Image: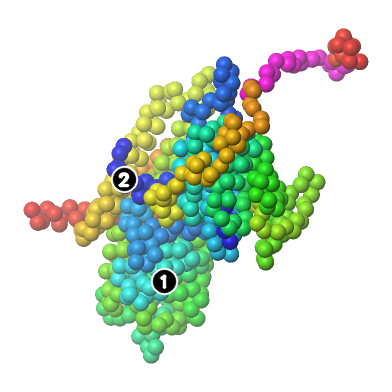
Amino acid sequence: MQYFLTDEQKTIKELARKLAEERILPVRAHLDEAEEFPWPIIKDMADSDLFRVFVPAEYEGLGGGCLELSLVVEELSRVCSGVAISYAATALGSYTLMDFGSEELKRKFLPDIAAGKKLCAFALTESTAGSDASGIRTTAEKVEGGYLLNGTKQFITNGGEAELYTIIALTDKSKGPRGASAFMVEKGTPGFTFGKKEKKMGIRASATCELVFQNCLIPEGNIIGRPGMGFIMAMKLLDKSRPGVGAQALGIAQGALEAAYEYTSQRIQFGQAIINQPVVQSMLADMSIQVEAARALIYAAARYADSGAKDITESSAAAKVFASDVAMRVTTDAVQLCGGAGYMKDYPLEKMMRDAKITQIYEGSNQVLRSAVAAELRKRKAKS
Amino acid sequence: MNIVVCLKQVPGTTEVKINPETNTLIRQGIKNIINPFDSYALEEGVRLKEKFGGKVTAISMGPAQAVDMLKETISLGADEAVLLSDRAFAGADTWATAYTLAGAVRKMGQIDLIICGRQSTDGDTAQVGPEMAEMLGAAFTAYVCQIEEISAGQMRVKRMMDEGYEIIQSTLPAVITVTKEINIPRLPSLRGVMKSKSAKIPIWTLQDMGLDPKKVGLNGSFTRVVKIFTPQHDKKAEMIHGEPEIQVTCLLGKLREGGLA
């Protein structure tokens, strides 16, 4: 397939692949087993300018959009999506700042983010607020000299490792979701500590942690956008970031397809490579078709988001849902094709299958996103 | 610091096949790469520049296609790159190559340090670095695995010998050849790759460097490659089977037969 990528996009994709194969591949099994955060690889990514990809040029970035970010995430995930998500979460944690932050705040933080000196995280989820993000309880009370944060955020990717956190908290409890605001909070701010570090089924190289705020005073200037806009900004952010999660799923599926192809080409049973069996070929063909369809949908959704279009909810949700379901099916089939070997930790397939699952769950569960797509369908029908 | 790194483009495999009829390397289907040892030299040069300031210039003697490799050096941190290319340079042995590289260094003027890989993976001679140092009258240290200190026109390096390490103090300008223990070369950066795509790589000819035509290429070479061949492995192994006693008796018999016991 030909996606007519520009020379610059091809360069970005090739470099991400080179980094993944040379720096991540040799250590991915260890990172998964040890649940170790990949700091040396983060350093390599920073040195290779990968964190510049999604930052605007005026803040020392390369000015790429959703598509460029997706290309990097796809290539990193092809080798290890645990590492890839640690990278992607920094984009997620800085988009709100980039899109709605004050000039002063952007000047203060974006150059360091672009240089890969500071990782970011985005914190919306709480124990009472998952799919229903309006259930957040963390508060930001306006006081003399700033805002006082209180509450606990849960399941935060890059929690504990990131330096910068975009926090969604209620500035006006009486207004519900319309009383939420977004803040930039730096690690080390008094009153900001880390709670439980989660042990996970997959993406184990990534860090997932609780953030605890106890009378944490943050400067007034650290608010992103206007008070009360927090929830709307968060929804816009997730619309924009979903193609990236789709790209993560796509990369996992691509990696699994390649590993399954290699194994079935080499595995001899009944005197010949099992890839010669029509039933195996049929499975591989289905996997390949699904992967390519996911790629086409993600690139299209990412390009649509980059076009500046406002109505990206449906396309972004569709790309994420489709690609993550593909990743789950393709990795499951890949394990099946590799038989006993696929089930063993000596081979990468079982890890890919574990890693795929989260893509159906986070940044909007596929069920919630299907509802969103259905709602858009009804809206269209009502208009016609 | 003004640093020059010398690099060679080599076939990207250590298992080069030789055409048995023509005795030449089969280059079809093999991608050319930076000689792996030279990539450590480049990385060390770039690190020194980052530490002390200055400039890193990558040079290579070779055909026009080596421009691609030199562009790659820009993506890996070199500030400039120059290709030394002329029909007259063809067929150079190590001496003629060193003479040509030394000519380029002289043309550049004040250079503090020249870094080479310990050897190339295709020729494997490890001679060009030391020969160049001799021609330039510069201090020379081979097999450097760590640069310990550079200050006041002096450098102290650690070099790896078969039986241990040696710490060597030398004056600058100097030529060193480095081993792969010296660093872990970086990956290219995106900004570097983008810069390298538009980078202009000047080509210096025999005339540009004012070299003696009798001392370059095949004309200037003291050695000639008469033949390249793959050694024939026609020895046959015979497996002796059976109980240990029978195997021993059988083996002894064969050794006696061959007059070896």
Residue A77, x across and y down, in percent: 44, 48
Residue A46, x across and y down, in percent: 48, 59
Going 52% across and 38% down the picture, which residue do you hit?
B62
Residue that carries the numbered disc 2 in the rendered image: A5
Magenta span: predominant SS is loop
Residue A340, x across and y down, in percent: 54, 35
Asked if the residue under mark 2 is in contact with the one under mark 1, i.e. CB atoms within 8 Å, the reply is no
- Residue B122 sits inside the magenta stretch: no
Q: Secondary structure at mark 2?
A: loop
Q: Looking at the image, which is closer to me, A230 or B178?
A: B178
Residue B62 is at least partly visible in this image: yes
Going 45% across and 63% down the picture, which residue do you hit?
A115
Dot 1 and dot 2 within a common chain: yes
* Chain ID at mark 1: A
The single residue placed furthest to the right in the displayed view is B261
Going 66% across and 32% down the picture, which residue do you hit?
B222
Q: Which residues are magenta?
A: B228-248
The single residue placed furthest to the top in the displayed view is B257
